[in-house]
Image: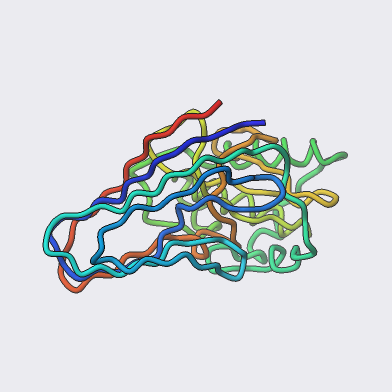
Amino acid sequence: MTRYKLSAEVSFSKPSEIMGRLYILPYRDNAQKVLHFNIDHPSFCKVSINQDRFRNEHLDFKCNPSDDFSIIISYEVEVNSFSKSENEEEVFLSSSKYVNVDKFKMINVRYFSFDDLIDEVISMVRDSIRYDKNNKSVKSAFGSLIMGSGVCVNYSHVAIGILRALGIPARYVIGLIPFSTKEAHAWIEVKIGDVWFPVDPTNGIKGMQYLKWAIGRDDNDVRSKIWYSKPVSFDFSFDWNFR
C-alpha cells in the first residue's frame, strides 16, 4: 500500500477571461481510494467536477479575473492494488489518435509468459527511444519510433502500439510518480486476467503503485486544456509526499 498527499496549485498571471479542463484529480476505483479532497478558488471562478467516457474526473473552470490568481487542489490518496477490468478492453485494442495499430503489426515479439512479454516490450521500447525532454514535437507512436527520442508520452505510445498489435489490450495513464516531484508522468496499464497491470516503459518498472489521475486510449484523451481571450501566463506546481 502506498499513500500520497498532494497540494497542486495552478497559478495564472496577466489577467484575462480564461477557461479550462484540468486532468489533475485522483482517479477513483477499487485500487485507488481518495481519503481527503478539497478545492480552493476565487469567487470570480465557476468550478465544477465532471466525468468523461472513461470515468476520469476532470476540473472544469471559467474565470474572469481582475488580478493574478490561483486554484488550489489538495487531496490524500491510498493505492493498494491493481485496477479491476470491467469488460471495457475492446476500446483499448483499437487504433487511436496517436497509436496506429496496423503500423506495429510488422513487429515480432517472442515470449512464453506474461512476464516475458512485458520485459521484452520494455526492452524494445527503451532500446528504440532515447529520453530527450527537449523533444516533444512528435506524439504519434510510430513517429516516435522513427524519431528515436522523446519523453514518457512517446515511450508509452510505442509500448501501447506493440501490445495492441499483438491483440493485448493496453491503455494510457497519467499521474505522478514517487521519485519525481516536478512534473506529471505517463505510463501504461496492460490487461491481464481480470486486472489492469501497470507498466512504466520509460523507467523500466512494472507492478508499481503510482498516483493515477486519468486513463485513456492515448495522450489525446487525458490532456489538460486551457483557453483564453487574451495571452495569459500560467504555471503548475506540486507540493506532495508519499509513504
- Relative placement, left or right, of 208 versus 192 is left
Q: How many marks?
A: 0
Return the x and y of residue 231 as percentages of the image width and height. 16, 65
In the foreground, 200 or 211 = 211
Residue at the outermost right position: 112
- Residue at left 66%, top 58%? 104
Q: Position of residue 232 (x, y in %)?
A: 18, 61
Q: Nearer the viewer, residue 166 or 88?
A: 88
Residue occupying the point 40% across, 65% down: 21
Query: If the image is split into quadrants, where does the N terminus sit?
Result: top right
Colour mapping: rainbow
Q: Is residue 47 left or right of residue 118?
A: left
Drawn side of residue 23 relative to residue 125, left or right: left
Q: Quadrant of the C terminus?
A: top right
Note whether 133 is above or below 89 in the view shown.
above
Extreme-bottom residue of the structure: 229
Quadrant housing residue 215: bottom right
Give the camera-side residue of 170 and 64: 64
Q: Position of residue 26 (x, y in %)?
A: 53, 50
Q: Is residue 117 left or right of residue 143?
A: right
Residue for point 53% across, 63% down: 98
Residue 90 higher or lower than 26, as above or below: below
Q: Position of residue 73 (x, y in %)?
A: 39, 49
Residue lying at the far front of the rendered structure: 43
Classify 22 as above or below 121: below
**Quarter of image, res 16:** bottom left
